[in-house]
């Protein structure tokens, strides 16, 4: 089978991109031909198995149309002539790409890796920290969602438009967790199947004896990961456990501010910021840790870090949000805490440090059992079944009511929203509908 992957990024930027690379390798081992298409800011690549378009990480001016990307994909589709297209994270690509895939005479599968299809900043969390049911529109401004991560009015319109297009165009959607699956179904995706991620096979990882009272965080240093909450919690926990240590693996925009926070909390050498660590070396830092901490404050779609911890024989302390509770069972393989609650997290850290050998062994055994359920073979079987079913869907069954003329008109609508953001933020839905009538757009947002 010839398969074309389409994604915003082609490098191993995060967990979703890492999964794509691992899936491509697994499919190739089974005799399938995989070609990957995407963008990167630093290079242009044109090979039989990889097409990379040089493009900055995000272009506001290109959220609807970008001739360079669209024409490159059109050419790739013609050259590859795939049996199926597998879309991944499309949020950074122009919606024109979605429409091109929708109209291509080939089955379309999409893995919905996160909540960017349903939320303009991907958090699906309101300003007060409560979960959001998703769906871009007036609620994005009514609940102070921009305080989590800022977004502009036109991004709300773009997100809703993309959701409507993809829910009509995708033949089979795949979700890494039941949380993503439920949201996709609630927002118009008809066939949504559970396809949890898996870890690359690296052989057995034997835990070392507990070496001190060391915690580990591994991930991007971005606000949504909640590392600031972890640092405050760690400072509180050290009142009862002054020998505790924390290793922070990863890098990102928040690193300097987090290092400053650690200094302000007078944590000294109790915290080490180790920067980016190769994936092949992460297990080295996990071994012997008291726990791996996943303090996310946004809606995590899955949580590969928890599986990494389980494989290394380490319990997990994590936020009770998104797909995390589907992996970490509270009081069995780890401890779940309320997101953004440093005191609750501090109590959990102290609780884990207080486990005796028998209790810790039970946590480790439960984590290993749970982690073993997420297999590469199971995921690939689900993906291949989706490919087969999508290829059998008649092309005429797809209905995406957006013409090229409509797309051009939407450019005008977004320009209007961009120029009059304060008014739009108060009356977004009304303004979208009135603008749509004025520009004679299809009633894509009215149904």
Image (cartoon, helix red, strand yellow):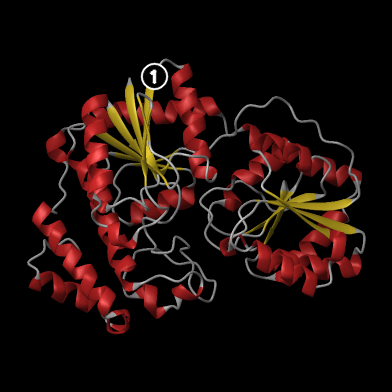
Q: Residue at x 36, y 28 (%)?
A: 35
x, y (%) of residue 277?
Answer: 68, 43
Q: Choose between 342 and 417: the one closer to the eye.
A: 417
Q: Residue at x 62, y 64 (%)?
A: 254
Q: Is residue 372 visible?
A: yes
Is residue 77 depicted above or below 336 in this figure?
A: above
Q: What is the total number of numbered labels drawn onto the structure image?
A: 1
x, y (%) of residue 116?
Answer: 40, 56
Q: Residue at x 60, y 43 (%)?
A: 304
Q: Residue at x 33, y 66 (%)?
A: 155
Instruction: Give SS at disc 1.
Output: loop
- Using residue 409 as the reference point, say whether residue 131 is left or right of it: right
Q: Residue 232 appears in which quarter of the rendering?
A: bottom right
x, y (%) of residue 150?
Answer: 45, 71
Q: Which residue is mark 1?
A: 32
Label 1 Cα neighbours within 10 Å, binned few <14 / some 14-19 / many ≥20:
some
Q: Quadrant of the C terminus?
A: bottom left
- Using residue 434 as the reference point, say whether residue 7 is left or right of it: right
Q: Residue 367 appears in which quarter of the rendering?
A: top right
Q: Choose between 38 and 188: the one closer to the eye.
A: 38
Q: Quadrant of the N terminus?
A: top left
- Using residue 164 as the reference point, say whether residue 336 is left or right of it: right
Q: Residue furthest top?
A: 31
Is residue 226 depicted above or below 302 in this figure?
A: below
x, y (%) of residue 14?
Answer: 54, 46
- Using residue 378 as the reference point, say whether residue 237 is left or right of it: right
Is residue 318 depicted above or below 136 in this figure?
A: above
Q: Is residue 446 visible?
A: no
Q: Choose between 266 and 22: the one closer to the eye.
A: 266
């Amino acid at each position: 089978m010839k398969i074309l992957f389409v994604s915003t990024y082609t490098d191993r930027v995060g967990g979703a991109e890492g999964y794509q690379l691992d899936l491509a390798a697994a499919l190739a081992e089974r005799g399938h031909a995989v070609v990957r298409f995407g963008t990167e800011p630093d290079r242009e690549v044109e090979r039989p198995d990889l097409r990379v378009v040089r493009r900055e990480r995000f272009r506001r001016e290109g959220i609807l149309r970008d001739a360079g990307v669209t024409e490159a994909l059109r050419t790739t589709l013609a050259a590859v002539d795939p049996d199926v297209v597998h879309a991944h994270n499309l949020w950074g690509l122009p919606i024109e790409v979605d429409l091109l895939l929708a109209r291509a005479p080939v089955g379309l599968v999409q893995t919905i890796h996160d909540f960017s299809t349903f939320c303009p900043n991907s958090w699906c969390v309101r300003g007060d920290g409560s979960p959001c049911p998703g769906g871009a529109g007036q609620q994005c401004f009514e609940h102070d969602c921009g305080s989590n991560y800022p977004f502009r009015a036109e991004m709300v319109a773009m997100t809703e438009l993309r959701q409507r297009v993809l829910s009509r165009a995708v033949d089979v959607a795949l979700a890494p967790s039941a949380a993503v699956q439920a949201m996709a179904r609630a927002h118009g995706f008809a066939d949504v199947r559970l396809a949890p991620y898996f870890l690359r096979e690296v052989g057995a990882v034997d835990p070392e004896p507990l070496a001190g009272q060391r915690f580990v965080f591994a991930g991007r240093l971005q606000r949504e990961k909640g590392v600031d909450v972890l640092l405050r919690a760690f400072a509180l926990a050290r009142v009862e456990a002054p020998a505790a240590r924390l290793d922070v693996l990863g890098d990102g925009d928040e690193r300097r501010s987090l290092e400053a926070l650690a200094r302000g909390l007078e944590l000294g050498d109790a915290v080490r910021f180790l920067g980016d660590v190769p994936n092949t070396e992460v297990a080295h830092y996990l071994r012997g840790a008291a726990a791996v901490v996943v303090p996310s404050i946004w809606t995590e779609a899955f949580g590969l870090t928890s599986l990494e911890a389980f494989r290394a024989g380490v319990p997990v302390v994590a936020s009770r949000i998104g797909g995390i509770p589907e992996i970490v069972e509270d009081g069995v393989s780890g401890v779940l805490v309320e997101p953004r609650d440093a005191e609750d997290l501090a109590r959990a850290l102290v609780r884990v440090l207080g486990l005796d050998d028998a209790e810790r062994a039970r946590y480790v055994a439960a984590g290993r059992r749970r982690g073993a359920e997420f297999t590469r073979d199971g995921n690939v079987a689900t993906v291949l079944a989706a490919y087969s079913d999508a290829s059998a869907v008649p092309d005429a069954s797809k209905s995406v009511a957006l013409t090229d003329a409509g797309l051009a008109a939407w450019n005008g609508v977004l320009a209007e929203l961009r120029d009059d953001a304060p008014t739009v933020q108060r009356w977004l839905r009304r303004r979208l509908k009135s603008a749509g009538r004025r520009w004679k757009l299809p009633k894509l947002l009215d149904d």
